[in-house]
Amino acid sequence: MTDMDSIRTDLERFNEALMREEYESRAGLKDEPDTASIYARYASIFDSEDLIYEVKAKREKAFGTEKLRMSYLYAYLLSSFIGRKNTDLGDKISATEARSEIEIDGKKVSFRYSAVIQANEPDHEKRIAIDSAREGVYDVLNPMLRERLDRSYEIARSFGYDNYVSMCADMSGIDLHALKFQMQNVLHRTDRLYTRHFRNICKDILGLSLSEVRAGDIGYLFRVKEFDRFFAQDKMLPVLDNTLSGMNMQIREGSNIHMDTEAREKKTPRAFCCPIKVPADVVLCIMPKGGMDDYRSLLHEMGHAQHFGNVAPDMAMEFKYMGDNSVTEAYAMLLEHLTGNKHWLEQQFDMTENDVSRLTHFQSFQTLYMLRRYAAKLLYEIELHSGMADPDKLYARILGDALKFQHPEKRYLYDLDSEFYSACYLRAWMLEVQIRTMLNDEFGTSWWNVRAAGDYLRNLWSTGQKYDGVKIARNMGYYGIDETLLVRELERNLRY
């Protein structure tokens, strides 16, 4: 009989080493990630199919909290087993992406940083040229991404699953096909609303018709430089501090939450939070590039950081590092969406009523765009992982139909979230509105100014991810995670 407490201790040490490696690699502090050696140090855990089967058997027999722990542990071990089998490819993919360069205006630029340049490029033709140059990197990455995916499929079958979809549904506890049905409803219900607003915004900001818009234009579209005069880079941290202080959540020297805001060329442009050791050492990393998106990213990642940084130290290891990631994503979105809240904007910035109105309207559209994008990604990923033919064409068609512009087929594997993380984002968008509605009802529409709201959130965060999104929604009085509130809010905010 395996000593589970010893396994848990080793897993916590493993997670600390892995998260530190991820942070240093993605933050541009080192060129070559080395997750393989970290997995190798814990090979007795991650090479053991017997341990996975033992935990699965314990899951079937357990009840209550112990069943939750075994469910999360099983999912983590199986996911890590897949990760262990793919470490060579994973490190190779990360290193290739970090080292890759493309040519922009006759100069060599890192592949990762090219996305930042593209988002700030006002010329449509130059943006498209950057996208074309990036396709050469996808050509290099795709064979590795395909091989990693095929290995994962083989592992799913070896553990008795019909396919990768059924394995991920069992690991996450999410009914992916029920969520697919919800998202088909969202796409249908919001199609006219989205198309009308997307057409108008593309004309106003890009000066392009729908038929002219390409994937390379989207970063610039949402960069919205006209709002830079409000979202100054040097005001980011003071605004963050003002926001958190109302809930008594200041970030001070020596805090367990550390922020890396330094610009580095090889730093990934996508902001991220690394919970290295929960709750004692949580790192928030953001690639500053200016504008509203920086504020959104900073607040989003601070939502993650506050969640992990406020977990009770004596919480079970499984609830600190495992569980339903829809929960932490909902908390991240709760802070991120302040940038679209008229009361928060009026409090933090010197804006006219017209500026506030235009900005909140735009932010609502951006949420609708992202919701439809991830709904389409879920539909595509279910088809991809079920073995549909011509997945590159399938990707371009499904994403193109949902978002109303052409998608490059070569991104069909690069634009992929492992183990259906897209489902977590979708559930989080719905859950966030439910949490925010409750905060509005209990503490008022400026709840971030109320210390009692901070106390309420810290109490939620203290349990880590012990409870999944459905349980949290039901604890607040909802039937479950539902799209109704979210769709109604978007329809209300975008009615003109």
Image (cartoon, helix red, strand yellow):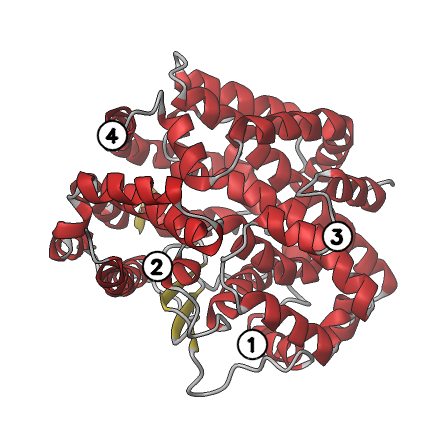
Q: Give the number of the disc on residue 267.
A: 2
SS at mark 1 in the image? helix
- In this view, the mark in front (3 or 4): 3
The residue carrying pointer 3 sits among few (fewer than 14), some (14 to 19) or many (20 or more) residues within 10 Å by Cα, namely: few
Q: Position of residue 281 (x, y in %)?
A: 37, 74
Characterize the local packing of mark 1: few (<14), some (14-19) or many (20 or more) Cα atoms within 10 angstroms.
Answer: some
Viewer-proximal residue among 309 and 233: 309
Q: Quadrant of residue 134?
A: top left
What separation in Å lies between label 3 and label 4 (alpha carbons)?
A: 40 Å
Could you tell me the amino acid type at mark 3? Gly
- The number of callouts visible is 4
Between disc 2 and disc 3, the foreground one is 3
**Amino acid type at mark 2:** Lys
Q: Quadrant of the C terminus?
A: top right
Give the mark, 1 or 2, whose residue is nearer the N terminus: 1
Q: Is residue 96 left or right of residue 212?
A: left
Residue 237 numbered tag: 1
N-terminal of the pair, mark 4 or mark 1, is 4
Q: Earlier in the sequence, mark 4 or mark 2?
A: 4
Callout 4 amino acid = Ile
Q: CA distance from mark 3 to mark 1?
A: 35 Å
User: Residue 314 appears at what percent x and percent y?
Assistant: 42, 73
Location of mark 3 (residue):
477
Q: Is residue 79 above or below residue 385?
A: below
Image depth: mark 4 or mark 1 in front: 4
| Image coordinates for residue 417, horizontal then vertical, percent | 42, 38
Disc on the earlier residue, 3 or 1? 1
Disc 4 target residue: 155
Q: Earlier in the sequence, mark 2 or mark 3?
A: 2
Give left or right: position of 42 versus 338.
Answer: left
